[in-house]
Image (cartoon, rainbow, N blue to C red):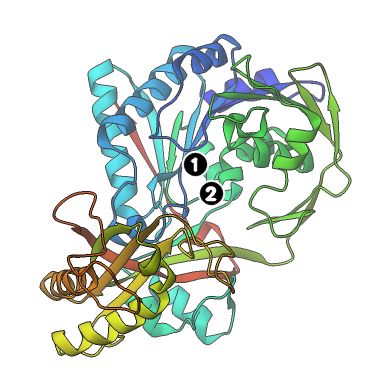
Amino acid sequence: MSALDRLRAECGGARAALRVISASGQLGYGVPEAAFAEGLRRRPHVIGADMGSTDPGPYYLGAGELATSDEMSRKDLRRLLVGARSIGVPLIIGTAGTGGARPHLETVLAMVREIARAEGLKFRMAAIRADLPRDVVKAAVRAKRIRPLGKMDAFGEAEVDGAAHLVGQMGTEAFVRALETGAEVVIAGRACDTAIYAAIPSLLGFPMGPAMHMAKIVECASLCCVPGGRDTMLATLEGDSFVLESMNPKRHATPMSVAAHSLYEQSDPHRVHEPEGTLNVESARYEAVDSHRTRVSGARWEPARRFTVKVEGATLVGERVALIAGSSDPRFIANIGTILDEMSAIVADLVGRKPGVDYQLSFRVYGIDGVVAWPKPPAVPPREVFVLGEAVAPTLALALTVAKTTKQYLLHHGFAGRLSTAGNLAFPFTPPEVVAGRAYRFSAYHVMEVDDLAALFPVEVEEVG
């Protein structure tokens, strides 16, 4: 009997309760042991974890690398894999390896196989690929079936070809197909966080409104609690409602904290758009069960008239070198805008290349406008500023040339009221030019209308162990 057959036998009834634990909001940064162990003691029916995001920026998708360390990624995967097999329940992991493209997925699958061999584990594993066929995306571009999210640059066939990796964000449908193969472990490429947790409720016939709302909140583990954290979270789905409980007794799921988390990462406070439809939480209710747990009900599911898939792609910009320095000179700080403008012109002349074409040089001044481009300077100048320079060029040699030249001339640049000719910068370490690797930009961050979801996300099954 497969894991799914056992779930259908135990949780398929109208009055059954489904226990789901979210082991981690992003696997690979550490799973607190005590909370996860408590989650296992609650005998969950499924264990899930998200392993990726666009939050770390375009580099990881473009480079095909993990944002997490190899050691911690293996440690977390081992904990979840051994835990799930010890109680015989499905383990579902979404957005493998940060970016969810082929190299990320292959890296994680290799880790899982190695862990299984070392621990003597045997199971059926399904892998779901998320790499989009470029001809399909080009056809969508030509048919005007693709639109940008936010303020993205124009997206055409050239951008499709130029992306180092191009992935689609799969929804519940792909996980359902994977589970129907009898897989006990599902490792997916780029995926909606909610799909990890909504797939099994969908298969078992639970109402999709509460199931998807549960998935939306639980995917970040105990982040919906007071105080928020990353400890394992238990969700118990009971027909038209679900109860949330952190496995860390110090983190409490309150009606206010859970309701607030329903707004997490959403521009629309009432609707969460998924490939297969829209979750509407406008009529949701949040009620305290006790000081530690909250019951949620009332969400509605609106099936899509047209399926959509979020498309993500990252394109190589060049090699990046960062320049790190600070200053406590009040005159330097007062003149920083003018100084940096003049510095950009001086470097362009010295290097003999055209800025914006042959290379890019930019600055962030933390303490003034490093995080936000404030329209006005601060009323009271800061005591110190941190200057982060960034040089990006087609070659590392040119990027280093720009950064090193900038360092030396910025250190001794003359400005109105300057007192110290010996230098006006402080360097936290030497060399202050840090090679930061390849620079990528998001070239695709769009929504594409599709007719067939299954064709985009193929499932591959293997016997492990």
Residue bearing mark 1:
178
If the image is split into quadrants, where does the C terminus sit?
top left
Label 1 element class: helix
**Above or below for 151 versus 324:** below
Q: Is residue 139 left or right of residue 364?
A: right
Identify which amino acid the numbered label 1 is placed on.
Answer: Ala
Which residue: 26% across, 61% down?
A: 425
Identify which amino acid the numbered label 2 is placed on.
Answer: Ala
* Nearer to the camera, 138 or 4: 138
On the question of residue 206 being in view, the answer is no
Q: Is residue 126 left or right of residue 391?
A: right
Q: Is residue 439 left or right of residue 243?
A: left
Determine contact: label 2, label 1, CB under 8 Å.
Answer: yes
* x and y percentages locating residue 300 in the rendered image: 83, 47
> Which disc is residue 174 wearing?
2
Label 2 element class: helix
Q: Is residue 464 left or right of residue 405?
A: right
* x and y percentages locating residue 32 in the rendered image: 46, 21
* Nearer to the camera, 419 or 292: 419
Q: Quadrant of residue 61?
A: bottom left
